[in-house]
Amino acid sequence: MWRNLKRLAVAILALSVLVAPALAQEEIFIPMLVYRTGPYAPNGIPAANGFRDYLRLLNARDGGINGVKITWEECETQYNTKLGVECYEKLKNKGPKGAALVNPYSTGITYQLIPRAPIDKVPIHSMGYGQTAAADGRVFAWAFNFPTTYWSQASAFIKYVGEQEGGMDKLKGKRIALVYHNSPYGKEPIPTLTVLAEQYGYDLQLLAVDHPGQEQKATWLQIRRYRPHWVFMWGWGVMNQVAIKEAAAIRYPMDRFIGVWWSGSESDVVPAGKDAIGYKAGNFHGVGTDFDVHRDILKYVYNGNLAEAKANNFGEVLYNRGLVNAMYDTEAIRTAMRKYGNRAVGGEEVRWGFENLHLTEDYLKQIGFGGFVRPIKITCEDHEGNGPVFIQQWTGETWKQVSDWITPMREVVRPMIEKAALEYAKENNITPRNCAAEQ
Amino acid sequence: MEVLNSLLVGPLRDIVSAPVFFAEVVVGGLMAGVMYSMVALGFVLIFKASEVFNFAQGAMVLFAALTLVGFMERGVPVGLALLAAAAVMVALAVAIERVMLRPLVNQPPLTLLMATIGLTFFLEGFGQLLWGSNVKELDVGIPDRTFDVGGMLLNQFDLVAAAVAAVMVALLAVLAQKTTLGRALRAVADDHEAAMAVGVPLKTIWVTVWSAAGIVALVAGIMWGAKSGVQFSLSLIALKALPVLILGGPHLDSGRHRRRSHHRRGGKNRRSLLGAAGRGGHRELVRLRAGDGLSAI
């Protein structure tokens, strides 16, 4: 009896030693840098849930990407740059081929990881955040910030305001205030708005709000005195809710108050109550749950249990953003598989996948994202894709799209990106790639 | 010359040219200070009893507000939820005294400070574990409309906050100055060992003080939570309340007493009960010994 048990144990051990690596070879590992705790948790939780649910959907519905299972591990960053870098270091070598890619989910963490990416061979996708100059793939070969950047969004805001005022020529003499989080993230739109102020003749006032942004009375008193025609906000976390309350307190018209896409989620407006009605924000993906991908998630991930799905922020703005982020990443992996075969792919191969990503309208429909995001094409030179944005407005119960898709001012933004990228290349002794030669 | 002009002449010119705006800035600054003073009061209470800076005051504000909203989300009426949250804060004070403070009697203030840092991490984690990390709306019925007074916009919420803060300061000042408990607080703050030697029930004092600090945290949590939603960031306002604490001083008592206390604290750590009493430095201790009815505390 004892001998039989020993034989069985040896057999199981031998089998696991032989089979486990074979199985692991067929798995793609994606590290998830999340912030489910800390001051920015209300924003971090829905985004992480959306990202995770899309991976769960692919595994449950399709058996992974082209049949290759996806594994992931969450690491808590608390939106803290140091913790984020630690998480990256901890997870970058996990999985049979290491991390396929990384989403830093913080501009500060992105800045720290950009120099490490070419060394570790892990591509970075900072979707709609991070270093804007990374849109120039000739200098930032390992960083991608599609579908659009802060600079593009700032230019789209100006286009929207011009349209609302009756034409771009009507911007002359207008006053625009930017209320921004006093951090690298918050300062991102300043160069674009400054250049456009010179071009269109509007006056720009910059008002910084220190972290975390709970006290803004002085800021809004300045706004009351300045009497701007429009207020833009590059806020994050509690800063957004307080800003909306303070704007209401000085009776600033909410429909002239526009937040960046990180200032336009449910957690930004719900705590402000009725004061938030009419407030606007940018966005680059659909709102709500009326898309095929949501129907699939409800069916395959939650077994039709809508209450459970809602408890996981199903359909909220930042949940949808997590979904979109996961879709872009997994489609980059799928693109890489077209070249390297249906197997677990490593960071270097996924980088190629990112750089050759092309999502057409028809293909987006096939994968359940029809009407949810715009088609996009990434190239060696262009890691942004110049994706358009739209303006959404809070009705008191839900976000509603109130503008058409706005194409950013590429003619203004792209030269700025190239200039900033070349400066970065010079500072860091990087020789820009010759994309024509690589093709 | 240009710097001097911008520093000295510019502001004066602005005040003269826009007096209403200047008044609004002053009033706005005062209202903001009032909001922070509610958090600073909690620091003062703990400091009174132990001469220790309670690093966990912000976490207590967060925990109290999360608990209140947690009860309200489960359908408990506002009044009952307030009582329940207050009861939780008292229970927390008892637990803190039993688990954290009691083993640290007579330890240097730095040790107690480190313990409160540990308490911060515990409360932040426990609060989020218990009630979740999502931002929560808090509406306890405080009016929040703005109205015009001579061109200045005033907010009803700010005025209510100012009134609440004034009442709290008055109550705590009376507690510190006019009651036996207040004298006992000062005695404990002067010297734990000496206070115990004359019959001051240190454990009861600490529980009472931490309970009061918990209630103050609850009030601060309500006011801040109603303004910006109940979320983790509430624990960070404590650090911004520090300038208020430094400007106002960590004492609730009069300047005369403060000067006296400051003088006494010069050799506090080296002082024995007999030595202190012999020098007449522990006036509170002597008065308490004379039969102030401390056993009733």
Image: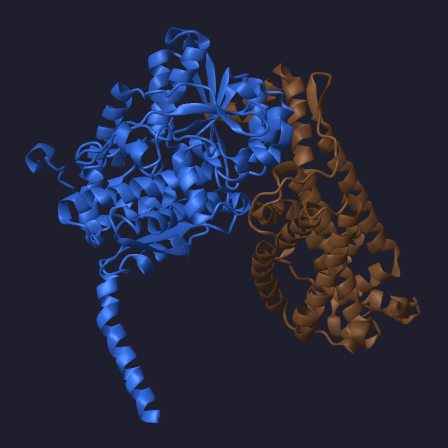
Residue under the point 64% across and 23% down: B22
Residue A386 appears in view: yes
**Callout count:** 0
> Residue B53: x percent and y percent?
64, 58
In the current view of this chain or complex, which residue is farthest to the left? Answer: A437
Q: Colour of chain A?
A: blue
Q: Is residue A20 above or below residue A288?
A: below
Q: Is residue A432 above or below residue B297?
A: above
> Residue B67: x percent and y percent?
68, 52
**Quadrant of the rendering where the N terminus of chain A is positioned:** bottom left
Report the side of A15 relative to B149 (left or right). Answer: left
Residue under the point 28% across and 20% down: A412
Q: Is residue A252 above or below residue B164?
A: above
**Quadrant of the rendering where the C terminus of chain A is positioned:** top left
Who is closer to the viewer here, B139 or A173?
B139
Residue under the point 92% across and 67% down: B293
Report the side of A278 relative to B61 (left or right). Answer: left
Report the side of A386 relative to A301 (left or right). Answer: left
In the current view of this chain or complex, which residue is farthest to the bottom? Answer: A2
> Residue B136: x percent and y percent?
61, 42
Who is closer to the viewer here, B284 or B137?
B137
* Colour scheme shown: by chain
> Residue B63: x percent and y percent?
64, 53
Report the side of B153 relative to B3 (left or right). Answer: right
Who is closer to the viewer here, A409 or B207?
A409
The brown one among the chains is B
Residue A385 appears in view: no
In the rendered image, which quarter is residue A141 located in?
top left
